[in-house]
Amino acid sequence: MRRVAALCAAAAIITSCSTRIEPDAGGRVLGTVTKVSDGDTITVSFGDTSESIRLIGVNTPETRHPTKPVECWGPEATLHMKSLLPVGTQVAIVRDEEARDRFERLLAYVYRTSDNVFVNEELVRRGSARPYPFPPNTAHEADFAEAAHDARQQRLGLWGHCER
């Protein structure tokens, strides 16, 4: 029931004055990547509107924080995101409980539509991101924890290059 309510709310969150964007039959809202800001933030256009999207449940090392230095594996995480979602890539987004973060970015799980790759999980699986459970948006918390465990065991990405 919680998932259905969140999916139904996606259409209400992604709207503009002239276009209302409805989720497809699977509860996904389709769009096109227009910018990769860093390893966990992208911009997606939905018809005639555009949204900054913060990927739910994952956190990549900083590259553009106003008060923090570039962190170990940050540039690599951004490059990984750019390789997963180059500008022009078609994506499907799915919400969880909360619609936006404190910076007004849309919070979402992102899927590449060409092959249904779950981008949030792929970043963790390849060592470009750590799990970042932030209740109440925790629908994939266990999946991200398992992916991180595997990446850490294999010393992939940040797990093999950055001391923590």
Image (tube, rainbow, N blue to C red):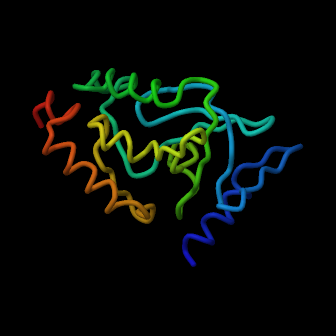
Is 60 drawn above or below residue 2 in the view shown? above
Is 97 drawn above or below residue 147 in the view shown? below
User: Seen in the image, is 154 located left or right of residue 42?
Assistant: left
Outermost residue on the right side: it is: 18
Q: Say which quadrant the N terminus sits in.
A: bottom right
User: Seen in the image, is 108 located left or right of residue 127?
Assistant: right
Q: Position of residue 91 (x, y in %)?
A: 61, 40
Q: How many marks?
A: 0
Is 9 drawn above or below residue 44 in the view shown? below
User: Seen in the image, is 92 located left or right of residue 21?
Assistant: left
Outermost residue on the left side: it is: 163
Q: Position of residue 158 (x, y in %)?
A: 21, 32
Q: Residue at x 33, y 29 (%)?
A: 62
Q: Residue at x 43, y 29 (%)?
A: 81
Outermost residue on the bottom side: it is: 1
135 or 159: nearer the viewer: 159
Q: Position of residue 149 (x, y in %)?
A: 19, 51
Is 142 drawn above or below residue 77 in the view shown? below
Question: Image quadrant of residue 39?
Answer: top left
Q: Say which quadrant the C terminus sits in.
A: top left
Q: Is residue 64 visible to the viewer in this orientation of the structure?
A: no
Q: Residue at x 23, y 31 (%)?
A: 157
Q: Is residue 67 visible to the viewer in this orientation of the structure?
A: yes
Q: Position of residue 59 (x, y in %)?
A: 34, 42
Q: Residue at x 33, y 51 (%)?
A: 132
